[in-house]
Amino acid sequence: MAAAGKIDPMHQFTVEPLIPLHIGKYDISFTNSAAWMVASLVVIALFMWGGMKREVVPGRWQMAVEGLTGFIDDLVKVNIGPEGKKFTPFIFSLFTFILAANLLGLLPLAIVPGWHAFTPTSHFSITGVLAIASFSLVLIVGFWRHGLHFFSLFLPAGTPWYMAPLIIPIEIVSFMVRPFSLALRLFVAMMAGHILMEVFGSFIVNGLSSGSVLGFGVGTISFLFIVGVGALELLICALQAYVFALLTSLYLNDAVNLH
Amino acid sequence: MDVASAKLIGAGLAAIGTGTAAIGVGFVFGQFLNSALRNPAAADGQQGRLFLGFALAELLGLMAFTVALLILFVF
C-alpha cells in the first residue's frame, strides 16, 4: 500500500478458487474458504485426539477437552433438559466449528507479505447454512415429536381469546426470523470486527509511513486502540460461538418441550 | 437530489441505529452490574444470561449497520 494509499477493507473477504473444479456448468472449486474450514476441522480433530485419553487423574490436555465437552453437556442439560442428551453432539459440533473458524481468522498471518487469514464465518453463505441446519433440526424434531400440535407453540397457554389474532402473527414472524437472525448475528459480528481491525491497521501503516508528526501520533493511538480491539475480538469470537450454540439449544427446547 | 447522494444520506441515517443499540447494550450490562452488587453470590450463575442478553441487543445494532450497507451497496 502506498504512503497515501486508499484503504480497502473488503479485500480480506474475497473468496478465490485454489483448485478449480467443474461439474457441467457448476463451479465447485476448492476455494480458500473451504481450505480454512478444513483447517478448522484439522485443529478441532487434533485438539480432541490429543485429549481423549482415559487417565483417571487427567493431565492438562485431557482436562481442557473434558472442560469443553462438559461445558456443552451442561449447556444442553440446563436448556433442553434430560431429553437433550441426544442433541449434544450437534450442539458440540456447532460450537467448536464456529469457535475454531472464528479464532483461526484472527491469526496474524499478514506478517508474511501477501498472506492473510480468512474467516469462513464472515460470509453469510456459511453462517446461513449453519443457521438453516439448526432451524431445520428444530422443525424436524418439533413435527416428529408433536405432529400438528407443534403449532400450539404460537399461542401460549392462558392468552385471552381476543388477544389471539394479535399474538399469533407476532409469534409466527418472530419464529420465522430465527434462522435469519442466527446467521446475521454471527456474520455481521465477524465481518464488522475484521473491517474495524483492517481500517485501524491501515491507519497505523499510513500514519507511520507518512513521515509527519501527526501521522506518527495517529499511528501510535491506532496501535493502542487496535490492541484493545484485538482483545475484544477474541472475546467476541468465543461469545458468538457460545450464543449460536445457546440459542440453538433454546430453540430445540421450544421444539422438544413446547414451552 | 440524485440517487447517489440520497444513498449516502440514507446510509448515514441508518447508522444512527448503531448508537441507539449501544445504549441498549450498556443497559444490559448496567442492570447486571447493579443487581450483581446487590446479590454477589447469585451473580456468577447468571453470567450465561448476561452474554445472551448482550448478543441479542448487539444484533439489533448490527442490523442497523447491515441496513446501512444494504442502502449503500445493493440499491
Image: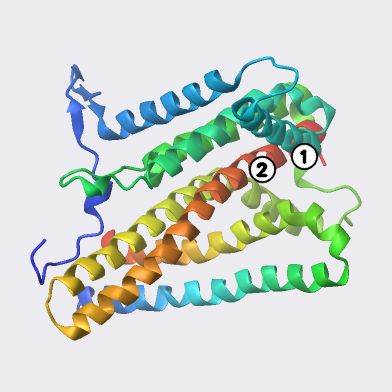
Give the chain letter at badge 2. A
Amino acid type at mark 2: Leu
Location of residue A179 in the rendering, given as x and y in whole percent from the top left corner = 55, 43
Q: Nearer the viewer, residue A52 or A20?
A: A52
The percent position of residue A223, horizontal first and vertical second, equals 33, 69
Disc with the residue nearer the chain's start (1 vs 2): 1
* A186 left or right, relative to B57: left
Place residue A126 in its image quadrant: top left
Q: Are marks 1 and 2 on the same chain?
A: yes
Instruction: Give the amino acid at mark 1.
Output: Asn
Which residue is painted at 63% across and 16% down in the image?
A53
Vertically, is A30 above or below B55? above
Q: Which mark is residue A246?
A: 2
Residue A79 is labelled as 1
Whole-number angstrom distance, CA of label 1 to CA of label 2 = 8 Å
- Is residue A174 shown above or below A90? below
Label 1: how many Cα within 10 Å (few below 14, some 14–19, many 20+): some
Q: Chain of mark 1?
A: A
Q: What residue sits 36% from the left and 77% below the top?
A: B12
